[in-house]
Amino acid sequence: MLSRRFQHIAPENQIRKEIFHLERHAAKFDLGRKESESLPEWFDRIGLKDPEKIVDAYEIVRYSNNMSTQSVEKYKHAVDQIKKEIKRIHKENLKRKQAKKNSK
């Protein structure tokens, strides 16, 4: 079951919409964001590397709502990279679980 966070419609703002979709993507891999987690806390918990660009851009938009079209495109690319990283982390977690299961 998806958390309450996903029962909402995607936000209008493109940056916030990307984070919304990223959260949904991560939830499919059991790496979803908890309701009480900030974006940096979530990224740290799941082990993402170098999430600063995403966090900085998200906070700019969240608190000022200003971002150039070029910056939005760079942001989308960075989110796509994080989605790939989430898949990689998920695969590693599955391998670890399988290895642990096999060692018993």
Image: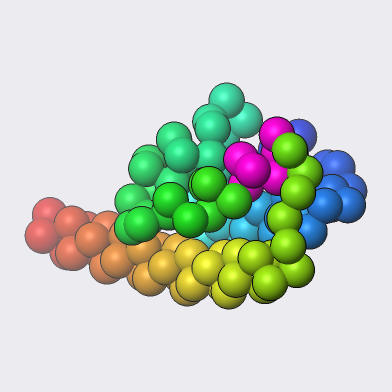
Q: Looking at the image, can residue 30 be seen?
A: no
Please indicate whether residue 101 sits to the left or right of residue 39 in the image.
left
Q: Which residues are magenta?
A: 58-63
Magenta stretch: dominant SS? helix
Please indicate whether residue 96 sits to the left or right of residue 48 in the image.
left
Whole-percent x, y for residue 97 in the image: 27, 58
Whole-percent x, y for residue 80 in the image: 57, 72
Tell me the quarter of the image containing the N terminus. Answer: top right
Whole-percent x, y for residue 70 in the image: 68, 72
Kindly identify the residue that appears in the image at 49 percent across and 72 percent down. 81
Kindly identify the residue that appears in the image at 23 percent across and 61 percent down. 96
Check the image and name the residue furthest to the left: 103
Kindly identify the residue that appears in the image at 49 percent across and 65 percent down. 82
Residue 6 part of the magenta-drawn span: no
Q: Quadrant of residue 60?
A: top right
Compared to residue 66, the image places residue 91 above or below, namely: below
